């Protein structure tokens, strides 16, 4: 799907950019919001908070570097989820990176957004697993084969449902972007 140069959401919405590891979620957020990937905290863009998992990874980097990845990853992920939740509950619009393959996390975020009188919207970046794997190597952060296979197994039914027109609870709206459409997107507006 090619939505054109911009996407629009109601003010205060939670917009999650989801896709396989390496699909281009961080690349899209970096390009749209002028991030350089070195940030350690959510970035304000007006009343919207831009939250990428790399911000949590960077924040923990020095303290967790000596620990194995299996220990670091849950702490980074928990910090990322906490930051999204905190921004939602503070009443900000949020655009955030997520893999999107954990339905319980999506339901929790949707509940929090509804609690604040807003809605969850999904932007799904759908690329084939080979393209996503190449993206991981290009960025220099490669997930294990087992982890990637698990994400692929969870992703395919999600994207198939969305492409088939089935609602993805708890999302109020879903936009699917292939790589070309993601590259053409110039803005995400909250109005």
Image (tube, helix red, strand yellow):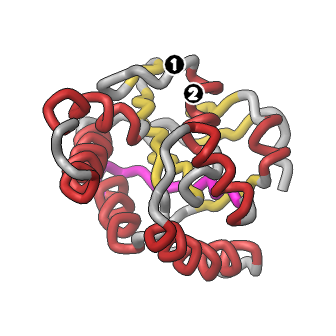
The percent position of residue 143, horizontal first and vertical second, equals 47, 57
In the rendered image, residue 121 lying in the magenta stretch gets the answer: yes
Say if residue 123 shows up in the picture: yes
Q: Residues within 10 Å of mark 1 (few under 14, many from 20)?
A: few
The percent position of residue 134, horizontal first and vertical second, equals 68, 51
Q: Residue at x 40, y 70 (%)?
A: 102
Disc with the residue nearer the chain's start (1 vs 2): 2
The percent position of residue 153, horizontal first and vertical second, equals 56, 80
Can you say whether 159 is above or below 113 in the image? below
Q: Residue at x 64, y 25 (%)?
A: 31
Say if residue 85 shows up in the picture: no
| Numbered range of the magenta stretch | 115-126
In the rendered image, residue 85 lying in the magenta stretch gets the answer: no
Marking on residue 4: none
The percent position of residue 156, horizontal first and vertical second, equals 64, 77
Quarter of the image that includes the N terminus: bottom right
**Number of marks drawn:** 2
Label 1–label 2 contact, CB within 8 A: yes
Q: Residue at x 64, y 39 (%)?
A: 138
Q: Residue at x 64, y 61 (%)?
A: 174
3D distance between C-alphas at marks 1 and 2:
6 Å
Residue furthest out toward the left? 63
Horizontal side, residue 166 vs residue 42: left or right:
right
Quarter of the image that includes the C terminus: top right
Q: Which structural element holds mark 1?
A: loop
Closest to the observer, 91 or 17:
17
Q: Which structural element holds mark 2?
A: helix
Q: Which residue is mark 1?
A: 36
Q: Which residue is mark 2?
A: 30
Q: Residues within 10 Å of mark 2 (few under 14, many from 20)?
A: some
């Amino acid at each position: 799907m090619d939505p054109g140069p911009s996407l629009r959401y109601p003010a205060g919405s939670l917009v999650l950019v989801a896709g396989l590891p390496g699909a281009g979620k961080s690349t899209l957020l970096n390009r749209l919001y002028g991030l350089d990937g070195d940030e350690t905290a959510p970035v304000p863009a007006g009343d919207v908070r831009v939250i990428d998992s790399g911000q949590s990874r960077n924040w923990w980097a020095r303290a967790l570097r000596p620990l194995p990845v299996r220990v670091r990853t849950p702490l980074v992920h928990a910090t990322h989820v906490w930051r999204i939740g905190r921004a939602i509950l503070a009443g900000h619009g949020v655009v955030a990176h997520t893999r999107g393959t954990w339905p319980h996390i999506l339901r929790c975020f949707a509940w929090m957004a509804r609690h604040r009188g807003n809605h969850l919207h999904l932007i799904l970046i759908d690329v084939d697993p080979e393209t996503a794997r190449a993206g991981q190597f290009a960025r220099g952060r490669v997930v294990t084969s087992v982890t990637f296979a698990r994400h692929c197994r969870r992703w395919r039914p999600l994207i198939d449902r969305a492409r088939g027109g089935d609602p993805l609870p708890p999302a109020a709206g879903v936009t699917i972007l292939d790589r070309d459409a993601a590259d053409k997107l110039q803005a995400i507006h909250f109005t």
